[in-house]
Image (spheres, rainbow, N blue to C red):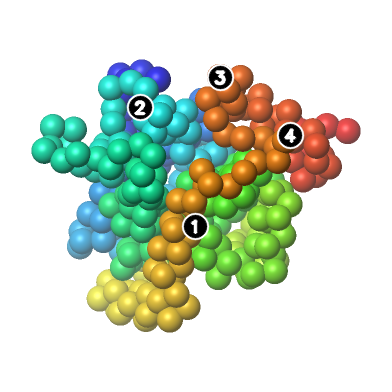
């Protein structure tokens, strides 16, 4: 499962184009048959593209969108779990962007640093998790269907979020782990009370609920989503000069750091690194090899049955009577 040849290339999953006339660049996620699950390489390519767009004078606005019915369900968890377990030909060095042939010994299994070196790396924009936070131009996220996991992080960091009706926001980790990286930013953008509800119940929030807590800028019918995103993108591109946008983004960066965004990212990584020390209850769902062998979709569906239909993660489960 960790053989890179068994998965689409990063270039296939993450596509990029720009229009120098409008100064709008677009990142399109294109792995719809796997709910746009992001491989390690895809996350790294995404990070690099965001960084380059931030430098490119042909770009003032960056739109992040997806092909298919969903923005995405998060990272490619089977790949990540196999790497962390030492299965296959890809090592932990690859996750933290250290070349496999580099004369570097990754911390041993059983050490705190084995997992912490990974989750603390999420605070680095080059990991692909926090890239939009450091982006000094305007970012717009177009949300459709599922916006879970890694994709939900992008929603917290994007400057503007345009959503289709029927979209769902959340993170399955709240049900199978209880925490996730960079929770501070969700607290800030959703409001503490609403985010506590999401964490403690594990339920996803609808687009309308996210709009009501000021997380989403606009909610439109699915067939109007692309037009609405373009409307926002063109307005931003035609507003103030790029230098002015850079200054505006610097102001918002200072404001977020006053709120503790980067400190929160480090603290979330510290807490997430303690996961192996937390004892599960007898019947709780655990993300382990047995769960993956059963199929993550099947495991989530079975666990969903313990919750009211309107609080389930899957659309099929939510549609059940």
Would you say the residues marked 4 and 2 are in contact, meaning their CB atoms lie under 8 Å apart? no
Instruction: Please tell me which of labels 3 and 1 falls first in the chain.
Output: 1
Query: Quarter of the image holding residue 195?
Result: bottom right
Q: Distance between the residues labelled 4 and 2?
A: 27 Å
**Label 2: which residue?**
86
**Label 4: which residue?**
283
Q: How far apart are marks 3 and 4 (CA)?
A: 18 Å
Q: Answer whether residue 29 is visible to the viewer in this image.
A: yes
Q: Which residue is drawn at 71% across and 55% down?
A: 200
Q: What's the mark number on residue 271?
A: 1
Residue 172, position as x, y percentages in the image = 61, 43
Q: Distance between the residues labelled 3 and 1?
A: 27 Å
Q: How far apart are marks 1 and 4 (CA)?
A: 23 Å
- In the rendered image, the quadrant that contains the C terminus is top right
**Label 3: which residue?**
293
Q: In this view, does 271 lie to the left or right of 317?
A: left
User: In front of the other: label 3 or label 2?
Assistant: 2
Q: Give whichever of 151, 105 is nearer the camera.
A: 105
> Does dot 4 land on a helix, a strand or a loop?
loop
Q: Give whichever of 227, 185 is nearer the camera.
A: 185
> Does dot 3 land on a helix, a strand or a loop?
helix
Q: Answer whether residue 19 is visible to the viewer in this image.
A: no
Residue 278, position as x, y percentages in the image = 58, 47
Instruction: Please tell me which of labels 2 and 1 falls first in the chain.
Output: 2
Above or below, 187 relative to 203: below
Instruction: Please tell me which of labels 1 and 4 falls first in the chain.
Output: 1
Residue 268, position as x, y percentages in the image = 48, 60
């Amino acid at each position: 499962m960790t053989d890179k040849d068994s998965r689409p290339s990063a270039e296939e999953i993450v596509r990029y184009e720009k229009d120098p006339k409008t100064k709008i660049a677009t990142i399109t996620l294109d792995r719809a048959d796997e709910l746009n699950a992001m491989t390690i390489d895809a996350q790294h390519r995404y990070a690099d593209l965001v960084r380059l767009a931030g430098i490119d004078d042909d770009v003032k606005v960056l739109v992040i969108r997806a092909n298919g019915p969903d923005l995405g369900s998060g990272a490619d968890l089977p790949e990540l779990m196999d790497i962390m377990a030492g299965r296959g030909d890809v090592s932990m060095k690859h996750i933290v962007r250290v070349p496999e042939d580099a004369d570097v010994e990754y911390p041993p299994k059983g050490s705190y640093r084995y997992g912490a070196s990974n989750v603390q790396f999420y605070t680095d924009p080059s990991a692909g998790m926090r890239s939009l936070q450091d982006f000094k131009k305007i970012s717009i996220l177009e949300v459709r269907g599922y916006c879970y996991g890694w994709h939900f992080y992008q929603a917290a960091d994007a400057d503007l979020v345009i959503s289709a009706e029927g979209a769902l926001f959340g993170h399955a980790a709240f049900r199978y782990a209880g925490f996730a990286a960079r929770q501070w930013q969700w607290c800030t953008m959703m409001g503490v009370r609403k985010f506590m509800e999401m964490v403690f119940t594990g339920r996803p929030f609808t687009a309308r609920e996210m709009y009501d807590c000021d997380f989403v800028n606009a909610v439109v019918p699915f067939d109007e989503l692309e037009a609405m995103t373009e409307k926002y993108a063109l307005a931003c591109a035609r507003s103030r000069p790029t230098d002015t946008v850079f200054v505006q983004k610097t102001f918002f960066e200072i404001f977020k750091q006053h709120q503790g965004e980067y400190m929160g990212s480090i603290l979330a990584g510290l807490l997430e690194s303690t996961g192996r020390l937390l004892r599960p209850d007898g019947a709780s769902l655990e993300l382990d090899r047995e769960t993956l062998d059963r199929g993550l979709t099947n495991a989530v569906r079975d666990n969903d049955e313990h919750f009211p239909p309107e609080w389930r993660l899957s659309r099929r489960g939510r549609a059940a009577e």
